[in-house]
C-alpha cells in the first residue's frame, strides 16, 4: 500500500514569545483526499500549512512526506505540492500576470510552447483572460487571489493546498475557484483547503478537520463532524437555510 502523502505526528509549535500555536497534532493525509481544515482566526491553520510544507520549522514532532522526513523530501515536495498562500501579495513575483503565472512551469524546465500552453490555460481557468499583460501588483485583491490560483494550476502539481482561497473573492470568483477545485478532484489530485468559510467548500470535501487553539478537536466525515461542533470551536455549521432576509443574520 502507498505511504500517506503526509504523516504528521506529535507536531507542536511554540513561538519565541511563548505562544503555543500548535500542540500534539497527529494527522495522516492520504493521496487523493479532499480535505478541509477549519478553525477560527488564530487557531493554527496557516502555521500548520507552513510547517508541513517546510516553510516553517516545528518545535517538536515529525512530518513525513510520502514516508520520508520532510528535510529529505523537500525536492520532491516542491514539485508535487502547490500552495495558494493566504496573503496573495506575498505570492506575486513576476511583473505581469502572464510572467507571474509562467514562473512555476519555467522552473520545471518545460519547453517554451508547453509553458505558453499551460499559462494561457491557467489564466483562462482562473478567470483572468484579458488581463495577461496587466502589472500583477496592480490587480485588485480578488484578482490577486485568482492569479495565485493560476500560478498553481500552471505548475500542474499533484497536490494543491489553498489557504483561505475565498478571501476577497466575489461570488463569480468563489464559483470559479470551486470549479477549479472540482476539476482538480476530477483529475485525481489531492486538495487541502484551509478556511473558516465552510459554507463555500464543504460540499466538495470528503473529510473535515477542525482545529481549535492549536489542537485537532474533530476529524472525520463532514456531516458527522458538523453534528458534533461546539460553540467554542468558532466554526459555524453551514447547514442553515436562508429563506428570508431575517435568516441571514450571523448573530
Ligand atoms: N511568526 C509568528 N510569530 C509569532 N506568532 C505567530 C507567528 N505566526 C503565527 N503566530 C501566531 O500563531 C497563531 C496561529 O496563527 P495562524 O496564522 O496559523 O492562524 P490561522 O488559523 O491561520 O488564522 P486565520 O484564520 O486568521 O488565518 C496566532 O495566534 C498567531 O498570532
Ligand atoms: Mg491563516
Image (tube, rainbow, N blue to C red):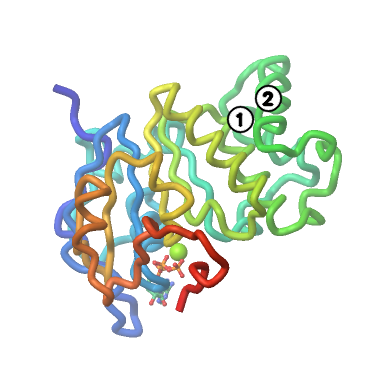
Q: Residues within 10 Å of mark 1 (few under 14, many from 20)?
A: many
Q: CA distance from mark 1 to mark 2?
A: 8 Å
Q: Badges 1 and 2: C-beta atoms under 8 Å apart? A: yes
Give whichever of 173, 115 is nearer the camera: 173
Give whichever of 232, 118 is nearer the camera: 232
x, y percent for residue 21: 30, 72
* Residue at numbered disc 2: 121
x, y percent for residue 38: 35, 59
Give the residue at x 27% y 60%: 210
Q: Is residue 106 left or right of residue 67?
A: right
Q: Earlier in the sequence, mark 1 or mark 2?
A: 2
Quarter of the image holding residue 78? top left
Label 1: which secondary element: helix
Label 2: which secondary element: helix
Give the residue at x 34% y 72%: 234
Give the residue at x 50% y 59%: 243
* Residue at numbered disc 1: 154
**Among all residues in the image, which is located at the extreme bottom?**
17
Q: Residues within 10 Å of mark 2 (few under 14, many from 20)?
A: some
Q: Which quadrant does the C terminus fall into?
A: bottom left
Give the residue at x 79% y 34%: 129
x, y percent for residue 123: 71, 33
Depth check, mark 1 against mark 2: the one in front is 2
Position above or below: 141 against 135: below
Number of numbered labels in the structure image: 2
Give whichever of 204, 116 is nearer the camera: 204
Amino acid at each position: 500500500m502507498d505511504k500517506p502523502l503526509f504523516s504528521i505526528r506529535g507536531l507542536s509549535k511554540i513561538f519565541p514569545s511563548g505562544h503555543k500555536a500548535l500542540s500534539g497534532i497527529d494527522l495522516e493525509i492520504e493521496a487523493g483526499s479532499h480535505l478541509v481544515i477549519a478553525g477560527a482566526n488564530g487557531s493554527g491553520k496557516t502555521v500548520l500549512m507552513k510547517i508541513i510544507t517546510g516553510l516553517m520549522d516545528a518545535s517538536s514532532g515529525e512530518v513525513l512526506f510520502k514516508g520520508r522526513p520532510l528535510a529529505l523530501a523537500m525536492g520532491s515536495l516542491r514539485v508535487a505540492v502547490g500552495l495558494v498562500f493566504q496573503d496573495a501579495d506575498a505570492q506575486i513575483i513576476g511583473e505581469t500576470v502572464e510572467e507571474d503565472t509562467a514562473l512555476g512551469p519555467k522552473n520545471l524546465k518545460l519547453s517554451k510552447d508547453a509553458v505558453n500552453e499551460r499559462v494561457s490555460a491557467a489564466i483562462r481557468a482562473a478567470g483572468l483572460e484579458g488581463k495577461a499583460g496587466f502589472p500583477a501588483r496592480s490587480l485588485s485583491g480578488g484578482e490577486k487571489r485568482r492569479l495565485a490560483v493560476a500560478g498553481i494550476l500552471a505548475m500542474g502539481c499533484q497536490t494543491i493546498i489553498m489557504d483561505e482561497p475565498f478571501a476577497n473573492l466575489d461570488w463569480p470568483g468563489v464559483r470559479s475557484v470551486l470549479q477549479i477545485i472540482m476539476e482538480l478532484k476530477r483529475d485525481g489530485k489531492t486538495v487541502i483547503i484551509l478556511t473558516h468559510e465552510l459554507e463555500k467548500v464543504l460540499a466538495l470535501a470528503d473529510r473535515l478537520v477542525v482545529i481549535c487553539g492549536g489542537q485537532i478537536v474533530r476529524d472525520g466525515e463532514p456531516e458527522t463532524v458538523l453534528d458534533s461542533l461546539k460553540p467554542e470551536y468558532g466554526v459555524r455549521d453551514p447547514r442553515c437555510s436562508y429563506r428570508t432576509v431575517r435568516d441571514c443574520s450571523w448573530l
